[in-house]
Amino acid sequence: MERLTKTDGLGNGDLIACFGCHPGNGNEKCGMCERPAEAYNKLAEYEDLQEQGQIFDPVEMAKIAMMQIELKKYKDAESDGRLVVLPCRPDSGAARMGYEMEMTNIRQQLYDTAESAGLPILSGDKCCRLLAWLYVFGGSCEAVTMDERLSNDILYAQKRLNVVSGELPDAELLPILQRYVRQTGGYDKPHENAPEWVSKLEAEYGICGKR
């Protein structure tokens, strides 16, 4: 677009066509010149575009340029298959809940598969320690019902020792269970300093200091 103005030696803006052209300088028809009208029309066009948001100042243009650079990064990542849209923030409560639910489903599938194949998930000794802890300390620990992993393992241990439906307990594992109960001091008078296996069991399930 042709430039119509420039700044004179005094720092004032003026029409290029008017430089050296004024009354008394061989141009007595200066007041009838159409060049000012062209400049006004051009200025009006520019201001109209600016009001319509089609012309930005330098700061806005810099912001748009930065946004375009950032947008290109996302477009490139999408093209490369590196862009993933998550349903929520990774550190949000919903994400943690979803993870815990997924892990619960996986553990349950593992238990069901192992049970149908006759494979033990927990050793007999571990089952006895779990049930001894439950009998002596579990009554005052809300993790027994709130923690999915702990409650699932306890249920598995109860099935393993055959103490769920009131049938005769497993004859091989019952003495081991009784021995662990005695080591704790029993339900009525548990020892103040529990055996080391109790601390390790509680650390494994993240319930230290909660009983």
Image (tube, helix red, strand yellow):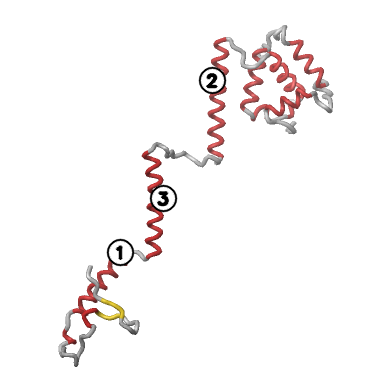
Q: Where is residue 69 in the image (x, y as percent from the top left)?
A: 39, 51
Which sits in the foreground, 111 or 196?
196
Q: Which circle, 2 or 3, is nearer the viewer?
A: 3
Q: In which quarter of the image is the N terminus?
A: bottom left
Asked if 118 appears above or below 188 in the picture, the reply is: above
Which sits in the foreground, 42 or 168?
42
Which residue corresponds to the image point at 78% horizontal and 14% vertical from the top-left? 178
Asked if 149 appears above or below 43 in the picture, the reply is: above
Which residue corresponds to the image point at 30% horizontal and 82% vertical from the top-left? 8
Which residue corresponds to the image point at 55% horizontal and 35% vertical from the top-left? 97
Q: Residues within 10 Å of mark 3 (few under 14, many from 20)?
A: few
- Where is residue 168, by image quadrant? top right
Q: Which circle, 3 or 1, is nearer the viewer?
A: 3
What's under tag 1, amino acid-wise? Gln
Give the mark, 2 or 1, whose residue is nearer the N terminus.
Answer: 1
User: How far apart are labels 2 and 1 at the CA level?
Assistant: 61 Å
What's under tag 3, amino acid-wise? Glu
In the image, taking residue 139 as reference, residue 68 lies left or right, namely left
Callout 1: helix, strand or loop?
loop
Q: Position of residue 205 (x, y in %)?
A: 67, 28
Q: Mark 1 points at which residue?
A: 52
Q: Residues within 10 Å of mark 1 (few under 14, many from 20)?
A: few
What's under tag 2, amino acid-wise? Gln
- Where is residue 104, by image quadrant? top right
In the image, taking residue 47 as reference, residue 110 lies left or right, namely right
Q: Name the residue under label 3.
A: 70
Give the mark, 3 or 1, whose residue is nearer the N terminus.
Answer: 1
Give the mark, 2 or 3, whose residue is nearer the N terminus.
Answer: 3
Q: Residue 109 carries which label?
A: 2
